[in-house]
Amino acid sequence: MKSILRLVTCSLGLLTWLSILAFTPVQPQASGDSVVHAVLFYSPTCGHCEYVITEVLPPLFDQYDEQLQMIGIDVTTPAGTDLFHAAWAYFGLEKAGVPFLVLGDRLLIGSVDIPEQFPGLIEMYLSQGGVDWPAIPGLQEALQDSEQAQTPAASPTAGG
């Protein structure tokens, strides 16, 4: 019973954090500012994903603030699965697991590669002027949908 309660508690905490991560508005940067854009594919039931999301990423977000922008893609949703498969094709993979982190043309998979390599890649890309969102087919539409979800709906105006 305790293990089920712990799993539910961890899952709820992870889902809360991921909903914040996935829907953090992407802020336009002033020209000349270096920004690293990254995409994290995750599953809310993956212990390795939870580790990366709760232990690895928060200090990086604290350190780099707006210079590190990331969107989280839940691979257990239909849209997330489609994007995940598009990322596989983009990198020439037949299949892969999560956590699956993409920045620029780099791919990091797992709770070992991400903590070991991601900080150095952030530094490398920042020193080169930043890196845009990866060219994964369908990602730009997902980013636009995420931005629209952050924009309050326009108020109806009186007829005229």
Image: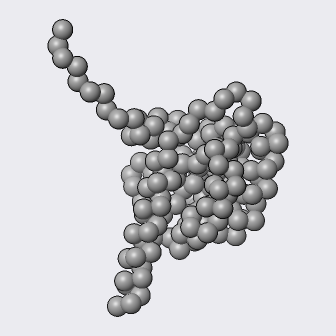
Name the image quarter holding the C terminus: top left
From this viewpoint, which residue is outermost toward the top?
160
Left or right of 81 in this view: 62 = right
* Quadrant position of residue 48: bottom right
Q: Position of residue 96 (x, y in %)?
A: 59, 61
Q: Please say if 97 is above or below 149.
A: below
Q: Position of residue 137 (x, y in %)?
A: 55, 38
Q: Please say if 8 is above or below 125.
A: below
* Quadrant position of residue 34: top right
Along the viewing direction, whichever of 78 and 71 lies nearer the viewer:
71
- Write the residue at 82% across / 42% down: 127
From this viewpoint, which residue is outermost toward the bottom?
1
- Write the residue at 44% across / 41% down: 146
Along the viewing direction, whichever of 110 and 57 lies nearer the viewer:
57
Q: Position of residue 98 (x, y in %)?
A: 56, 63
Left or right of 68 in this view: 85 = left
